[in-house]
Amino acid sequence: MTFSSVTFLFMLLPVTFILYALIKNLNARNIILAAASIVFYAFGEPVAVMIMLISIVLNYLFGLGASGVKWDKLSVVLAVLLNIGMLAVYKYSGFFVEIFNGITGLSVPVPQIRLPIGISFFTFQGLSYVIDVYRDKKNVQKSLFSVLLYISFFPQLIAGPIVRYSDIADRLRDREFSVDRVARGICRFIFGLAKKVLIANQMGLLADKVFGCATAELGTGAAWVGAITYSLQIFFDFSGYSDMAIGLGCVFGFDFRENFNYPFISSSIQEFWRRWHISLSTWFKEYVYIPLGGNRKGNARTTFNKLVVFFLTGLWHGANFTFIVWGMLHGLCQMLETYQIIPTKKKWFRPIGHIYTLLIVILGFVIFRADTLAQGIGIIGTMFSPHAGSAVANAEIFSCISPMAILAFGLSLILSTPIFRLIRERVEKTEKAALYNYAAYAGSMVLFALSVLSLVSSKYNPFIYFRF
């Protein structure tokens, strides 16, 4: 998605909001949101919009089939084949052909298929809808239009959070539109935008500089700078987008579940995944882990099920062994925690657990960010061994640590903790709650102005999860 797409979004939002506010009929409002969603996606992906629409229609039909008795199982099987098949073709076909060529020594042409933005999200939503209907026939939606709006709703279409149909089914039929919701939603949207533009982009400048260098050129300090800044970049980038989606949903009367809950304060990898990308981990728990048996069939089977989930979690992120290794690293740590080889349940271990968790998360994100496993392993090796590297390359990296980057880093550390949430919860119990809200609104306007100035004056940096 280019800068022009972002400009288009800022043009589309006011028009959509004004029409939505002026027209009181709920069905008409749903039509406005659906039309805005399709126009928004078509602007960034004019060809892929047909792929999304075909997917929606087929999942709607499979949902109808899953609501019956005669064809319910077949409908679910076909839904799985459709949605996973789409991902396999568009996201993994080149990856699989390269592996095949490497194993056999053949030279089968590698297909060059452009990945539609958001396909990992809208296919998972469509599949979850059909499975939920199969599990409970009352979840079926007879209106194709409602299914279309659910899957294509533009705030969370291209980078989540992944929303289950049951979470918003009631809101499609009846929802509130008020000044209070609009104000809260806009504040949340601006907060997410600021997290992306003012923090994630600043961290990304440093991370890109480090990962753009040859591993041999990096010094130990520079390698740590890259690892830490990328970990902060991906968190504030993705959580910022989730905040924007939740905020826009609130404006239009929808309440999406939180997707992040301060994951960097975790004291175990298991806790980290209860706080990180909650909608994805919940999806895999509901539709993979529990159907495999969950933790009901003994420790060995539980371990196997978790490793399968984390293998698929890594693979979901992209067609590269770096993502698979990242997922398996987290799966391995969860296994060690389950067997208490890493004693995360011991009280004495908790302070150490925070350090251990941060270390695993940061090292994992080095692998995640690297172009190849060799690069990721090389950077990790440099992090833990005295290495001078190239004086020129390291000087160039450290010269990018501007006052703005230092300020963004300090803010990222503060915002990685729930300190402001705790302050808000305490203030809301006092007579100063209204004053706090006015201050929050005023602060939002300042953040919005700074974000717009930053967008205008700097190179556009797309959201990381747009490519997944």
Image (cartoon, helix red, strand yellow):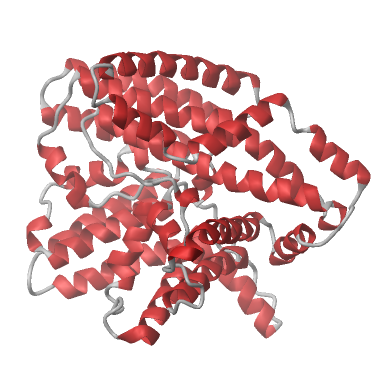
Closer to the camera, 231 or 322? 231
Tell me which corner region of the image, top left, top right, bottom left or bottom right, holds residue 66: bottom left
Residue closest to the far right:
391
Q: Is residue 217 left or right of residue 458?
A: right
Q: On screen, 338 above or below 444?
A: below
Is residue 59 visible in the rendered image? The answer is yes
Q: On screen, 75 above or below 399?
A: below
Q: Is residue 268 left or right of residue 369?
A: left
**Residue 62: percent from the left, percent from the top?**
20, 62
Q: How many marks?
A: 0
**Residue 446: percent from the left, percent from the top?**
48, 14
Tell me which corner region of the image, top left, top right, bottom left or bottom right, holds residue 82: bottom left
For image coordinates 27% across by 19% down, the residue present is: 433
Residue closest to the far front:
348
For image coordinates 50% across by 15% down, the residue present is: 449
Q: On screen, 293 above or below 409?
A: below
Closer to the camera, 130 or 461? 461
**Residue 388: percent from the left, percent from the top?**
89, 53
**Residue 214: percent from the left, percent from the top?**
82, 54
For image coordinates 24% across by 22% down, the residue present is: 430
Is residue 212 visible in the rendered image? The answer is no
Q: Is residue 207 left or right of residue 198?
A: right
Q: On screen, 193 above or below 432?
A: below
Q: Is residue 94 left or right of residue 310?
A: right
